[in-house]
Image: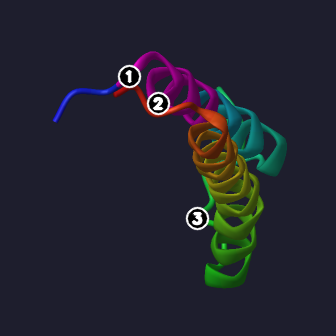
């Protein structure tokens, strides 16, 4: 399976968003406290990451679906 340009953009944006969320959550702090976060904190961070990622991907799929509806069929 090959990724098109929009899927590659979504992948890069998702990874970048994950880094931002992890930095803000304090999990990836360089030289910081090395305590293990609680399961509730990890679950919250995962929800904070996954909700926008899924929403953006779903929005892109719906835009592509609507755009295909306006294309004229060539005969």
Which quadrant holds the C terminus?
Answer: top left
Task: Compute the Cα span from label 1 to label 3.
Answer: 38 Å
Q: Is residue 61 left or right of residue 21?
A: left
**Please, is residue 64 above or below residue 53 in the view?**
above
* Depth check, front residue: 11 or 28: 11
Which residue is disc 3 drawn over?
A: 36
Tags 2 and 1 in contact by the CB under 8 Å rule?
yes
Q: Is residue 45 left or right of residue 12?
A: right
Is disc 1 surrounded by few (<14), some (14 to 19) or many (20+) residues within 10 Å? few
* Depth check, front residue: 4 or 47: 4
Q: Main secondary structure of the magenta part?
A: helix
**Please, is residue 21 above or below residue 48 in the view?**
above
Which residue is disc 2 drawn over?
A: 7
* Depth check, front residue: 71 or 40: 71
Tell me, yes or no, whether the highlighted magenta stretch contains residue 6.
yes
Is disc 2 surrounded by few (<14), some (14 to 19) or many (20+) residues within 10 Å? few
Q: Is residue 11 left or right of residue 30?
A: left
Image quadrant assignment for residue 36 = bottom right
Tell me, yes or no, whether the highlighted magenta stretch contains residue 60.
no
Tags 1 and 3 in contact by the CB under 8 Å rule?
no
Q: Magenta region: which residues?
A: 4-15
Which residue is disc 1 drawn over?
A: 4
């Amino acid at each position: 399976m090959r990724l098109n340009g929009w899927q590659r953009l979504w992948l890069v944006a998702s990874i970048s968003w994950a880094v931002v969320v992890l930095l803000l959550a304090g999990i990836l702090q360089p030289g910081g406290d090395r305590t293990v976060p609680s399961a509730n904190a990890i679950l919250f961070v995962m929800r904070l990451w996954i909700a926008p990622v899924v929403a953006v991907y779903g929005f892109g799929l719906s835009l592509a679906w609507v755009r295909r509806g306006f294309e004229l069929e060539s005969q």
